[in-house]
Amino acid sequence: MRLRTIALASGALITATLLLAGCAQSNDMGGMPGMDNGSMPASPTAGTFNSADEMFVTMMIPHHEQAIQMADVILGKDGIDPRVTALAQQIKDAQGPEITTMASWLKDWGMPEPSATGGMAGMGQGDGMMSQDDMAALENATGVDAARLFLTGMISHHQGAIQMAKSVIDNGQDPKVAALAKKISASQSAEITTMQSLLGSL
């Protein structure tokens, strides 16, 4: 009788052990609904941008910085048509905050902000960037000549930015970058129309 009791107790213990093992295995395989099953949460910035987004932001920062330099040059001169200086101020006021926004994205992505000299060195005339000689000519010009150099240079500069915007709209991934690119394309297209009109009236 004693041996039969011990056998029954042992059987119950083995059964309980197997049931517990089965539960543990079930949790490892699928887990309970609503449980994370030990998986790590995805990074909030993972997969939100791609190389096209990165290139656009990295190159547009120095592109905007040069536009502001051009605006500062014309704003520092006397005898410039007030319509031209008003446009230069408008460009400066728009692009300064955009630089701050793009720099914050690079920081969020864990990437360094491009230096002004390094970023500009990586850009060509196809991006509408002014060369050192172009900038020197603008700085040395006066009156109507300075206004014309500014407008013609800025038209090319804007056209380069619009092409850069189109590229990231077509190939980028981050919706914030696409939204900014669309804003840049629309506003700078309108400014090109204004500048072409100003050139014809100087």
Image (cartoon, helix red, strand yellow):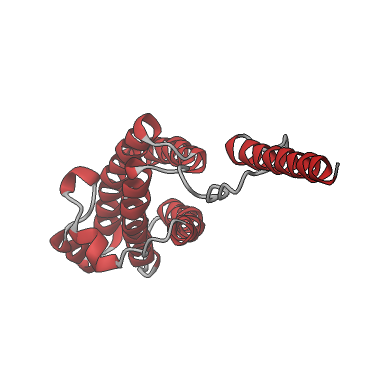
> Considering only vertical position in the picture, is 162 above or below 87?
above
- Say if residue 202 shows up in the picture: no
176 vs 137: above or below: above
Taking the image as shown, residue 187 lies to the left or right of residue 38, namely left
Q: Tell me which corner region of the image, top left, top right, bottom left or bottom right, holds residue 166.
A: top left
Q: Which residue is more in the foreground, 143 or 127?
A: 127
Lateral position of residue 18 relative to residue 40, left or right: right
Place residue 78 in its image quadrant: bottom left
**67 or 71: nearer the viewer:** 67
Q: Residue at x 65, y 44 (%)?
A: 36
The N terminus: image quadrant:
top right
Q: Is residue 22 left or right of residue 170?
A: right
- The answer to whether any part of residue 104 appears in the image is yes
- Residue at 71 percent of width and 37 percent of height: 32
Q: Position of residue 54 (x, y in %)?
A: 35, 49
Q: Position of residue 119 (x, y in %)?
A: 26, 60
Question: Camera-side residue: 81 or 66?
Answer: 66
Q: Percent position (x, y) of residue 81?
A: 40, 55
Q: Position of residue 18 (x, y in %)?
A: 67, 39
